[in-house]
Image (spheres, rainbow, N blue to C red):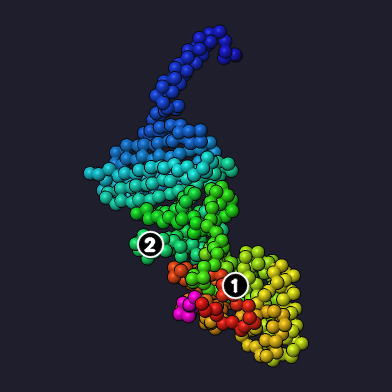
């Protein structure tokens, strides 16, 4: 049996003709496809091509005791569509369940579910789709927002973890910035749990990024959102997104020293340590701050890559002996070994030859001063002691540093205590707001043309 026999040909031609005519009508109406179809459930589905990437689908249903209107944007890629449809279907199911539960309360007023959709173009292949849900069931109103970020090159939903390096220290810093943004807008920030919680489960978080700001939305009403300028996010934005959006960060290190500026030197002793130093480096980077790390050569040998990273990120490396002995209790040859060998080890690992020397515990005698002098290594002590090693309490570190600070201060910290790293963001934030800039010991010395042997506790000017 052949379907295409002579009898069927006129019928096929007529069908084809009608199909073409209908197609033309569609084009004249400015819509490529505009199909109205009644499903058995009385749904209406309208479809509209928006551009080459997206089509809009509107589902409406006017039932006896509710109305429903759900807009969605669909792509050519099933995996992307599924994520969005899963969420929409869940919301619809939840709504219909609630309608069932409140059935006898819906006599006078119909329940309503409206889900609208916005399309935001970030670049030619990167889009943000934001759904805004409004629900009203017997006077109980609900609002919700849900975002999907779509990469049409890799054909996938972009997660927050794709654009942010979500280490623990970064999360704390991010929260700090978010709170600050809220305060600047005169808003209350009493409940940060939604963001904190969301950052632990970033796939739950609603966000949108463009060349200027990263926006977080609280998912439930009343659509609280916070916009963070991307300039603040140097420390955590991933390289691909920085490149993709062509984000240019201000260069913190480009400043020339101003004789009337407020400068201080942060110093970190006894590291590097893998638990704390990376976090310290990230925070310093975020503030465009440079610091001086008085390393132990033994620690640099344990963690050579980390020691090198400190130097590579533009910080100064100081000498703090090999094993942290009380030098006053050692003979001259041992003192010499601790100072000179340590310097060679650090130089071999980091490529930076330490200029300044800090004796362990700040304890030195004439023999130590003499050997430091012979090595052209000025002794650097401190004017502000954070006592971070003693209290191991971030709040305490913050208090002590802020109490003691003055232009020219040298601040003693240790990049081996997590509580020190925890204190660092708040301290830098506050000092930054006071107009302080954070420079290395060498820069502080250059500022005042100091080239003696010390010991220097601070550089007042
Ligand atoms: Zn020390």
Image side of residue 408 versus residue 321, left or right: left
Q: Is residue 144 magenta?
A: no
The residue carrying pointer 1 sits among few (fewer than 14), some (14 to 19) or many (20 or more) residues within 10 Å by Cα, namely few
Between residue 123 and residue 4, name the one nearer to us: 123
**Some atom of ligand 1 lies within 8 Å of the CB belonging to the residue at label 1:** no
For the view shown, which residue lies furthest in the top direction?
6
The circle drawn on residue 184 is 2
Between residue 274 and residue 123, name the one nearer to us: 123
Q: Position of residue 18 (x, y in %)?
A: 45, 16
Residue 460 visible, this angle? yes
Q: Which residues are magenta?
A: 400-407
Q: Quadrant of the N terminus?
A: top right
Q: Secondary structure at mark 2?
A: helix
Residue at the (69%, 69%) spot, across then down: 352
Q: Position of residue 332 (x, y in %)?
A: 74, 89
The residue carrying pointer 2 sits among few (fewer than 14), some (14 to 19) or many (20 or more) residues within 10 Å by Cα, namely few
For the view shown, which residue lies furthest in the left direction?
108
Q: Secondary structure at mark 1?
A: helix
């Amino acid at each position: 049996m052949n379907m295409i026999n002579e009898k069927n040909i006129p019928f096929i031609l007529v069908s084809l003709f009608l199909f073409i005519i209908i197609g033309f009508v569609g084009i004249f109406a400015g819509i490529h496809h505009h199909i109205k179809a009644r499903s058995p459930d009385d749904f209406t589905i309208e479809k509209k091509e928006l551009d080459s990437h997206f089509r809009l689908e509107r589902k409406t249903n006017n039932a006896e005791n509710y109305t429903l209107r759900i807009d969605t944007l669909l792509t050519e890629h099933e995996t992307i569509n599924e994520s969005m449809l899963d969420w929409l279907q869940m919301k619809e199911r939840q709504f219909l369940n609630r309608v069932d539960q409140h059935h006898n309360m819906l006599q006078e007023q119909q329940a309503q579910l409206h889900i609208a959709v916005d399309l935001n173009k970030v670049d030619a292949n990167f889009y943000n789709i934001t759904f805004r849900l409004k629900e009203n069931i017997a006077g109980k109103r609900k609002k919700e927002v849900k975002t999907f970020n779509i990469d049409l090159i890799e054909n996938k939903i972009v997660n927050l973890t794709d654009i942010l390096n979500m280490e623990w220290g970064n999360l704390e810093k991010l929260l700090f910035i978010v709170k600050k943004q809220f305060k600047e807008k005169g808003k209350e920030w009493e409940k940060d749990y939604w963001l904190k919680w969301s950052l632990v489960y970033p796939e739950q978080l609603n966000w949108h990024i463009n060349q200027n700001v990263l926006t977080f939305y609280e998912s439930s009403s009343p659509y609280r959102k916070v916009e963070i300028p991307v300039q603040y996010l140097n420390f955590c934005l991933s390289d691909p997104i920085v490149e993709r959006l062509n984000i240019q960060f201000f260069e913190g290190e480009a400043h020339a020293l101003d004789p009337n500026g407020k400068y201080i030197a942060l110093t970190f002793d006894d590291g590097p340590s893998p638990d704390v130093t990376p976090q310290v480096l990230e925070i310093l980077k975020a503030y465009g701050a440079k610091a001086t790390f008085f390393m132990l050569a033994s620690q640099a040998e344990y963690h050579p890559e980390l020691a090198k990273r400190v130097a590579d990120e533009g910080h100064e490396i100081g000498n703090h002996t090999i094993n942290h002995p009380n030098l006053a209790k050692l003979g001259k040859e041992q003192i010499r070994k601790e100072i000179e060998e340590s310097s060679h080890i650090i130089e071999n690992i980091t490529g930076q030859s330490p200029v300044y020397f800090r004796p362990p515990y700040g304890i030195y005698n004439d023999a130590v001063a003499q050997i430091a002098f012979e090595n052209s290594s000025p002794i650097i002590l401190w004017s502000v002691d954070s006592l971070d090693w003693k209290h191991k309490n971030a709040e305490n570190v913050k208090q002590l540093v802020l109490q003691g600070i003055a232009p020219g201060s040298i601040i003693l910290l240790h990049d081996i205590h997590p509580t020190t790293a925890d204190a660092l963001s708040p301290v830098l934030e506050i000092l930054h707001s006071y107009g302080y800039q954070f420079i290395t010991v060498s820069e502080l010395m250059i500022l005042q043309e100091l080239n003696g042997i010390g010991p220097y506790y601070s550089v007042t000017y």
